[in-house]
């Protein structure tokens, strides 16, 4: 009976959480220990689409700095002249919604809503980081991170760094066993 009142609360917690769902693909033929440097695929641009918030140069700069920092942790350096890897970054923010149904008699007395349905609006953010060998053009690593957020999120430097760390967590560090 009271289970239905937890649906909106559960969705709110789910959407406000900072968890990033990450899917990573690595080429089994790639020798990651041979890669020492990287550069951006399209000059120094992060490709973005959807919500105008991601066109913000401050946010794009934070994203690029976080990737450079995490790549250094992985043992790679930024080299615009002769990189081993070319890194492409694509970001989307999409407005989404969820319709939640509930029975009026299942709600507590203090529940403010009188309607049986409620529309939850949120953003679905996706970041794709792909790496290809410069010499062969072969894709060797691709990671996709998805995060659900409130409509007007404050994406701090720390938030961006955590997302990038999660997306690049699957990149093999030379000398470390997986």
Image (cartoon, rainbow, N blue to C red):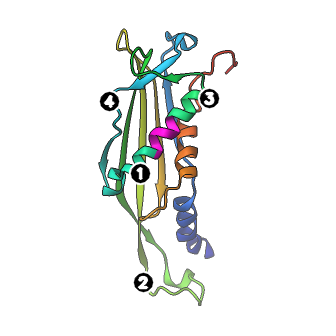
Q: Which residue is mark 2?
A: 115
Report the quarter where the N terminus lies: bottom right
The quadrant in which residue 115 appears is bottom left
**Rendered image: mark on residue 21:** none
Residue 66 part of the magenta segment: yes
Q: Is residue 20 above or below residue 108?
A: above
Q: Earlier in the sequence, mark 3 or mark 1?
A: 1
Q: Which residue is mark 1?
A: 58
Q: Are marks 3 and 1 in contact (CB under 8 Å)?
A: no
Q: Which residues are magenta?
A: 62-67
Where disc 3 sits, the SS reads helix
Where disc 1 sits, the SS reads helix
Q: Earlier in the sequence, mark 3 or mark 4?
A: 4
The answer for how far apart the CA atoms under marks 1 and 4 are is: 17 Å
Where disc 2 sits, the SS reads loop
For the point 54% across and 10% down, the residue is: 34
| Residue 26 x %, y % | 50, 21
């Amino acid at each position: 009976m009271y289970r239905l009142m937890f649906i909106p609360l559960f969705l709110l917690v789910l959407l406000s959480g900072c968890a990033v769902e990450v899917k990573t693909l690595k080429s089994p033929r790639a020798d990651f220990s041979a890669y020492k440097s990287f550069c951006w695929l399209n000059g120094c641009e992060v490709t973005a689409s959807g919500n105008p918030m991601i066109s913000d140069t401050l946010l794009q700069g934070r994203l690029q700095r976080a990737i450079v920092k995490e790549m250094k942790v992985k043992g790679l350096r930024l080299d615009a002249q002769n990189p081993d890897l070319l890194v492409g970054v694509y970001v989307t923010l999409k407005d989404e919604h969820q319709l939640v149904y509930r029975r009026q008699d299942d709600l507590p007395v203090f529940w403010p809503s009188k309607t049986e349905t409620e529309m939850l609006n949120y953003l679905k953010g996706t970041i794709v980081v792909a790496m290809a060998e410069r010499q062969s053009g072969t894709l060797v690593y691709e990671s996709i991170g998805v995060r659900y957020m409130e409509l007007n999120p404050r994406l701090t430097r720390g938030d961006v760094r955590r997302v990038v760390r999660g997306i690049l967590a699957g990149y093999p560090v030379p000398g470390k066993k997986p």
